[in-house]
Each structure stands twice: as structure tokens, then as C-alpha cells.
């Protein structure tokens, strides 16, 4: 909530724009990612439920970036625990439900897992001037890296959109 002003030498003003994040490049520079995995809660949905391919504007700190839900990994309960797999659990997320999903941004965005830095790890997605869902970033990168790190004797899942496929355009 605090605002801080500072002066930076040898920086062209054309390089600074909305959504830019300042950090210490020698200690721990702010990460930039185009893909990330997040836990989401659907507040309200469009005429149809939220499913793979859903696109909206992601608002995180001061950045506004078009983003696509590329995969629904599994549903979670209010405590964040994985729900037993149901036949349609990876097909859609209804209002009031939570899930772990993989997202792809149209351009790189500065986000971090909420456990590391909460201000850069929380976001909302808006569509048609309505807040459709809110989320918490769990990991950077695609769903493969997230699922490998999860383990714990669970059967492996496959991602709906693998690296070879091109995600649909959000602004067409």
C-alpha cells in the first residue's frame, strides 16, 4: 500500500511503462513469465462455464495482459486440497468452484508465486467489465514443471495444450 518515489539514472523513459516492476538485478531480480500455474476461484462465469481456451484480461499489480486458460489440472477444495478426479473435473470450472489451472499470457508479465511475494502472486481476470475469477500464482512455467514437482504418489496428468500446439488468440 505504500508509494515510493526514486530516481534512476541512465534509464530511458520509453522503457518504463504500465506494469513495469523494479527490483535488484544482483540479489533476486523479479521474474518474467509467459506461462504460469495458479489456483483459481470462479466468481461468476460468462453464459458458459470457464473451460480450457477461456480468455480474458489478467490484472496483476498494475499490469493488464490478455491471458488464456490453457489447462485445468484438477479441482481443489476450500482448503486447497486436491479433489478426487471426476469425469468432467478437468473440463470446466463452475462459479464457486476452485481449481488448479495453467495460464498463458499474450506477452511476458512479471509474476511470482504468492508464497514468495504475495503482491506479485495475486491476480483477477476480467471479461466484459466483470470480475470473472481471482487467483493465486503457484508456480512459474507450464503445467509439466508444476506436476513434476508435485509428485506424492499421484498418477501423472497430461497437459491439454502441449508446447507444440499454438494457443488460440485471445483478441481475435
Image (cartoon, helix red, strand yellow):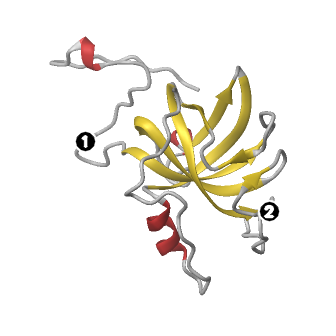
The N terminus, quarter of image: top right
Percent of width and height locating residue 171: 52, 27
Please name whichever residue, 110 or 8, is drawn nearer the observer in this view of the structure: 110
Q: Residues within 10 Å of mark 1 (few under 14, many from 20)?
A: few
Question: Residue 38 location in percent, x, y?
Answer: 59, 52
Q: Would you place residue 27 above or below residue 128 in this image?
A: below
Residue 23 in which image quadrant? top left
In percent of the image, x 78 and y 75: which residue is there? 84
Q: How many marks?
A: 2
Q: Residue at x 68, y 27 (%)?
A: 127
The tag earlier along the polypeptide, 1 or 2, is: 1
- Structural crowding at the residue carrying mark 2, measured as other residues with C-alpha within 10 Å and reported as few (<14), some (14–19) or many (≥20): few
Image quadrant of residue 5?
Answer: top left
Outermost residue, right direction?
96
Judge by depth and name the residue closer to the eye, 33 or 158: 158
**Which residue is labeled 2 in the image?**
77
Which numbered circle lies on residue 25?
1
Amino acid at each position: 500500500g505504500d508509494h515510493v518515489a526514486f530516481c534512476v539514472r541512465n534509464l530511458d523513459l520509453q522503457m518504463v511503462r504500465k506494469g513495469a516492476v523494479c527490483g535488484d538485478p544482483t540479489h533476486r531480480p523479479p521474474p518474467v513469465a509467459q506461462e504460469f500455474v495458479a489456483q483459481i476461484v470462479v466468481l461468476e462465469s460468462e453464459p458458459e462455464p470457464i473451460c480450457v481456451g477461456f480468455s480474458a484480461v489478467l490484472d496483476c499489480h498494475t499490469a493488464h495482459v490478455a491471458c488464456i486458460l490453457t489447462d485445468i489440472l484438477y479441482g481443489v477444495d476450500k482448503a486447497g486440497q486436491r479433489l478426487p478426479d471426476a469425469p468432467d473435473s478437468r473440463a470446466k470450472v463452475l462459479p464457486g468452484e476452485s481449481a488448479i489451472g495453467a495460464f498463458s499470457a499474450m506477452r511476458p508479465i512479471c509474476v511470482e508465486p504468492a508464497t514468495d511475494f504475495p503482491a506479485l502472486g495475486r491476480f483477477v481476470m476480467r471479461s466484459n467489465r466483470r470480475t470473472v475469477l481471482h487467483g493465486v500464482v503457484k508456480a512459474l512455467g507450464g503445467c509439466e514443471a508444476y506436476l513434476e514437482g508435485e509428485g506424492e504418489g499421484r498418477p501423472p496428468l497430461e497437459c491439454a495444450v502441449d508446447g507444440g500446439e499454438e494457443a488460440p488468440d485471445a483478441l481475435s
